């Protein structure tokens, strides 16, 4: 597929930015369907806002269903579903792949 640079308008600041042919190729390889809506600066601000809000999450103390270690999770656990510490979750995820 032949990609060419496109000029897009940021939905946040209204500035024009270039969606390069290389970026378009990357999006296509990843299977992304939509073009970016924000310029690089506004994307960076949005990421920082998300990280700041994520840092203020309420944590819940639970016991790992696999190893029994006490750990904290950023969601309220459901009684009938297992909850894992970071280490056990990573091990289970690696086994699935």
Image (spheres, rainbow, N blue to C red):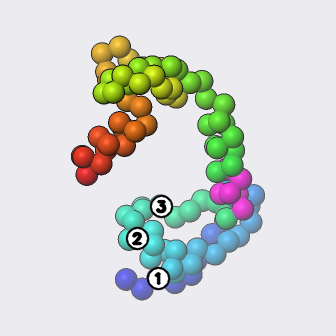
User: Closer to the N terminus: mark 1 or mark 3?
Assistant: 1
**Structural distance between the alpha carbons of marks 1 and 3:** 15 Å
Q: What distance separates the C-alpha of mark 2 from that of mark 3?
A: 10 Å
State whether residue 22 appears in this view. Answer: yes
Image coordinates for residue 15, horizontal then vertical, percent: 74, 66
Mark 2 crowdedness (10 Å alpha carbons): few <14, some 14-19, many ≥20? few
Q: How busy is the neighbourhood of tag 1: few (under 14 within 10 Å), some, or many (20 plus)?
A: few
Q: Which residue is pictured at 37% across the width and 29% down the height? A: 84
Check contact, mark 2 vs mark 3: CB within 8 A: no
Residue that label 1 marks: 3
Quadrant in the rendering for residue 80: top left
Mark 2 and mark 3 lie on one chain; the one further toward the N terminus is: 2
Vertical comparison of 3 with 19: above or below: below
Q: Is residue 45 magenta?
A: yes
Mark 3 — residue? Answer: 34
In the image shown, does 54 or 71 lie closer to the viewer? 71
Q: Residue at x 56, y 24 (%)?
A: 59
Q: Disc 1, disc 2: CB below 8 Å?
A: yes
Picture residue at 33% right of the left edge, 23% below the top: 65
What secondary structure do most residues of the magenta stretch adopt? helix
Which quadrant of the view contains residue 14? Answer: bottom right
**Residue 88 or residue 93, whichever sits in front:** 88
Q: Is residue 31 above or below residue 87?
A: below
**Does residue 83 appear in this view?**
no
Residue 45 image offset from top left, x and y in percent: 71, 53
Q: Secondary structure at mark 1?
A: loop
The residue stretch that appears in magenta = 41-46
Label 2's element? helix
């Amino acid at each position: 597929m032949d990609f060419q640079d496109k000029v897009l308008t940021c939905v946040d600041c209204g500035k024009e930015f270039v969606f390069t042919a290389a970026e378009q190729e990357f999006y296509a390889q990843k299977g992304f369907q939509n073009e970016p809506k924000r310029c690089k600066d506004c994307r960076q601000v949005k990421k920082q806002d998300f990280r700041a809000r994520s840092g203020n999450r309420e944590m819940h103390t639970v016991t790992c269903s696999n190893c029994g270690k006490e750990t904290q999770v950023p969601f309220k656990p459901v009684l009938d579903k297992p909850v894992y510490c970071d280490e056990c979750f990573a091990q289970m995820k690696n086994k699935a792949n």
